Every structure is written in C-alpha cells, then in structure tokens.
C-alpha cells in the first residue's frame, strides 16, 4: 500500500440477506491523505453501504477495507478515535438543546469538560448557532439541524470525516456555511469522504471523485479529468454522471 493511502478498499463485496444482486461488487478504491474525495452514484449504487462498512456499522461479505493500515472489521478500536461521521439522518435528540446534544456526543470521546465546553462554544459561534444554543432542537429549521449535526461529527477533531449527504434539503445560506467549514477543515489537513447527489456541489468541492453504480466502480479522477475523458459527450460532471449511469429513474 502506498504511504499516503489513508483508505484502502480491496474487492469489497456486500450481499444483503434478501438481496438479489450485490450492493457492492468487488469495489476497489484508494483514498489519499488530505483529499476531499467524492463518492457519487444514483440511488442504490452502494454509496451508503460503502460508508457503513468503513464506519464498521455493517460487515462486508467479501474483500476488506483498511483505514490508516488498520483492518476496519478486525481492529476498529484503533480507528475509531480519529474518524468522524456526519450521517444523512439527523442524529440529534429533538428535545435537547444544541449545547446538551453536543455535551452528550462529546462525552463519548472522553473529552475533558473544559476543552469540551470551549469546543462547543467555538463551533456554535462559527456555525451561527451560539445565540440559540439553549433552545430545543425540535424548533430548528432543517439547515440549523444540519449544522448541529456536522458539529457533532467533528467535535473531537477527527483527521478523517465521513459525510453522507451533509447539505441535503437545506437553505443556501446553511449550505454555504457548511461547505466553507468543510474547506477549512480540509486546509487544516482533515481528509473528507463525501457522498451526495448534488453534482454541482461535488464538482466544486472535491479534489477527486469516484462514480459507482450497481456496486461497481465506473470511473475515478479529478472533476476536470473526468470531463476531459468524456469531452465528446460531456461538458460538466453532471453530463459525465448521466453518460455513465444512464437517465432512467432509480428508486
């Protein structure tokens, strides 16, 4: 494995119990330190399955994946401290405040109380949420909840963050706050694995992109490399995506 490979995915296969076809079918990928890596594909392509395996939420059927040289399924305890997860679902307690939620999630990483309070106040201020830190989450807009959800995933200063649809269904202002902070994190050396259906966002944000479908890797490269590779048919990443995955509707 190359020295700067952070995530190594080798022949990764996942067949669900009642699945007719593999959700992942011998997927091979290397993701490098310091990248903002986009994992793109239609509904059912295998994006969330890949991230779930990397986070050790589900096991693979065949193949393996390693993070920083550690096998995810065999030695996740060595990986857990330096990864953060921002899930597609809002993983917050609706009857608690942002501050209470973040104290709870921060305590899972055994952060000292003083450091935890300072980090919570810092991120709430940065995300424009400090003035509402003592109001219940259930009264928040979707964009506000997404911002708190992001803070919960990065509160412990991880060096690798998994992001599954981090800006879905939110207003433009919240989206820009989140994307600006993701770029800041990356400039500080944090590696980001980002999955989304927002192709224009991915094209601007990601340093490299993989497009998968039916659990298989279709192509990988920088946004400009991909558009150049298919330039006879494609002018942007969305054109490349449709060229490779087709135009029929996915459920």
Image: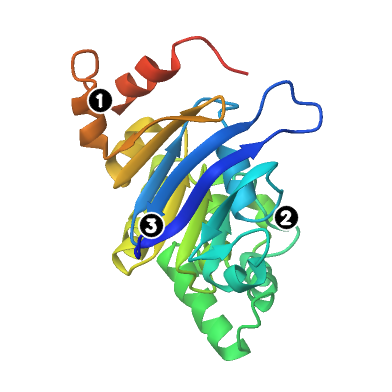
Looking at the rendering, which quadrant does residue 48 occupy?
top right
In front of the other: 56 or 145 = 56
**In x, y percent, where is residue 75?**
65, 67
Residue matched to label 3: 182
Q: Is residue 203 above or below residue 45?
A: below
**In x, y percent, where is residue 190?**
39, 65
- Residue 106 in sight from this viewpoint: yes
The answer to which of marks 3 and 1 sits earlier in the sequence is 3
Q: Is residue 55 left or right of residue 201?
A: right
Q: Is residue 249 left or right of residue 100?
A: left
In front of the other: 43 or 54 = 54
Q: Is residue 229 above or below residue 81?
A: above
Looking at the rendering, which quadrant does residue 240 occupy?
top left
SS at mark 1 in the image = loop
The label shown at residue 94 is 2
- Quadrant where the image shows the N terminus: bottom left
Number of numbered callouts drawn: 3
SS at mark 3 in the image = helix
Residue matched to label 1: 236
The answer to which of marks 1 and 2 sits earlier in the sequence is 2
CA separation in Å, label 3 and label 2: 25 Å
Residue reaching furthest to the right: 18
């Amino acid at each position: 494995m190359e020295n700067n490979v952070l995530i190594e995915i080798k022949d990764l296969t996942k067949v669900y119990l009642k699945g007719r076809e593999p959700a992942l079918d011998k997927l091979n990928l290397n993701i490098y330190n310091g990248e903002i890596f986009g994992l793109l594909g239609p509904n059912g392509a295998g994006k969330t399955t890949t991230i779930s395996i990397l986070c050790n939420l589900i096991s693979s059927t065949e193949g393996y994946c390693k993070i920083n040289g550690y096998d995810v399924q065999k030695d996740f305890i060595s990986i857990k401290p330096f990864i953060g997860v921002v899930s597609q679902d809002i993983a917050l307690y609706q009857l608690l405040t942002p501050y209470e939620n973040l104290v709870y999630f921060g305590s899972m990483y055994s952060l000292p109380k003083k450091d935890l309070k300072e980090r919570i106040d810092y991120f709430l201020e940065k995300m424009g949420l400090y003035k509402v830190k003592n109001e219940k989450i259930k009264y928040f807009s979707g964009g506000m909840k997404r911002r708190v959800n992001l803070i919960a995933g990065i509160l412990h200063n991880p060096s690798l963050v998994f992001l599954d649809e981090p800006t879905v269904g939110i207003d433009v202002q919240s989206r820009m706050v989140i994307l600006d902070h993701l770029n800041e994190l990356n400039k500080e050396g944090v590696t980001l694995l980002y999955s989304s259906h927002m192709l224009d966002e991915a094209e601007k944000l990601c340093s490299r992109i993989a497009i998968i479908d039916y659990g298989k890797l279709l192509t990988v490269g920088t946004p400009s490399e991909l558009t150049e590779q298919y330039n006879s048919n494609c002018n942007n990443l969305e054109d490349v995506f449709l060229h490779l995955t087709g135009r029929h509707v996915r459920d």
